[in-house]
Image (cartoon, rainbow, N blue to C red):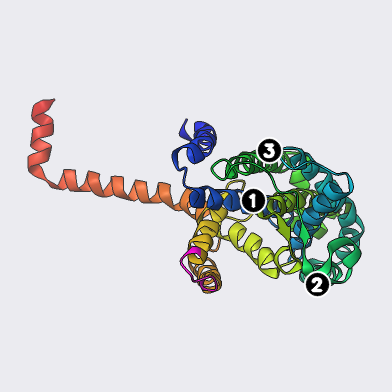
Amino acid sequence: MIRKWSPLALLVLSIVFPLVFTNPVVTTIGVFTLIYATMASAWNILGGYSGYISLGHASFFGIGAYAVAILAKAWNVSPGWAPFALLLVGGLVAAIISVPFGYLALRTRRHTFVVITIAYFFIFQLLSYNLTGLTNGSSGLPMPIPTWSSGFFNYPFYYVGLALLVLTLCVSWWVRHSRFGLGLLAIRDDEDRAEGLGVKTGPSKLAAFVIAAFFIAMAGGLYGYFVTYLYPATLFNPLNDLAMALMTFTGGIGTLSGPILGAFIIEPARQIFAIAGGASLYLIMYGALFLVIILLLPDGIWPSLRRKLPQWMATRKNHTDDAQNANPRNKAEEEASV
């Protein structure tokens, strides 16, 4: 019963969160956390379900942001709510671009695939610096700046980010429980055997690659509109790839709730480090957390808790029963009450 209603309870808590914690610093952390939770959940559709670990999907984060900025300028989109509609267009642009790159990268197997996605990332990073006619290079590209008051500014981004996260989770849930998702899981377990059983491994992997790119690009568009100015060094940052992977591994790769749990732990901690003046300390946190997860919780926090919590409760119950049976006074009191 608790498991059935917990997603709804978490959604309600997320909705009322900015209404209770109205400090702009807190709501800013909330916006960034929702953006990274969306990215990690989308990345998990490829890396978690198919087993193909991509370290280049942060490219589509940058592509989505630049697509929204360029289209907003070309179409003279007014600041306010209108640019949010361009998030879908930015996601579609990134999805289209991802098809040929995904097709080429997925012709290789897992370890080579990782290297190729890294190469793709740096290609897009170089293009963002050198295609000055589109991106304005290192000088940066402005986004439309909303005219909302400072007290209200974070709220639209927060709720759009929450809606985007819910949409990504719904798609992730559908993928995991569909025939398509079963094929991805079979590829993760044994790709050759899955192909022998009739799974169309190539199209399945490519579809997961494109879906992940689509939602990561939408998150990138939301991020770009929120920060109001785009720089290649920020949007095409290899640490974004590391963050998506680490968040997913921390919470539990291949699970629905694992990437969210990882994002809700790591991103607020990173923001707190930045506010406290230790902007580079989160890199140490990344490394230390990665070692802890790999050595102590290789399945991630959520799968480990789900597996070990019933064992711990059963052990505690057995100890309690043994203690009561070993105490004659308690036993006599129980018999007298009967």
Return the x and y of residue 330 as percentages of the image width and height: 11, 39
Is residue 189 visible in the rendered image? The answer is no
Is residue 280 shown in magenta? yes
Residue 38 on image: x %, y %: 66, 49
At x 51%, y 33%, the residue is 12
Rounded to the nearest whole Å, what is the CA distance between mark 3 and mark 1?
Answer: 16 Å
As shown in the figure, which amino acid type bears the numbered disc 2? Phe
Which of the marked residues, 1 or 2, is nearer the chain's N terminus?
Answer: 1
Helix, strand or loop under label 2: helix
Name the front one of labels 3 and 1. Answer: 1
Q: Which residue is mark 1?
A: 35
Q: Nearer the viewer, residue 225 or 249?
A: 225
Q: The residue tagged with tag 3: helix, strand or loop?
A: helix
Give the residue number, with chain letter if any, for mark 3.
170
Q: Looking at the image, which residue is at 73% across and 52% down?
A: 216
Residue 124 versus residue 200 in the image, above or below:
below
Residue 170, image x and y in percent?
A: 68, 38
Q: Which residues are magenta?
A: 275-281
Please name the residue shown 88% across and 61% down the image.
134
Identify which residue, 310 or 135, lies in the foreground: 135
Considering the image in quadrants, where does the C terminus appear?
top left
Locate residue 121, reporting x and y percent.
79, 68
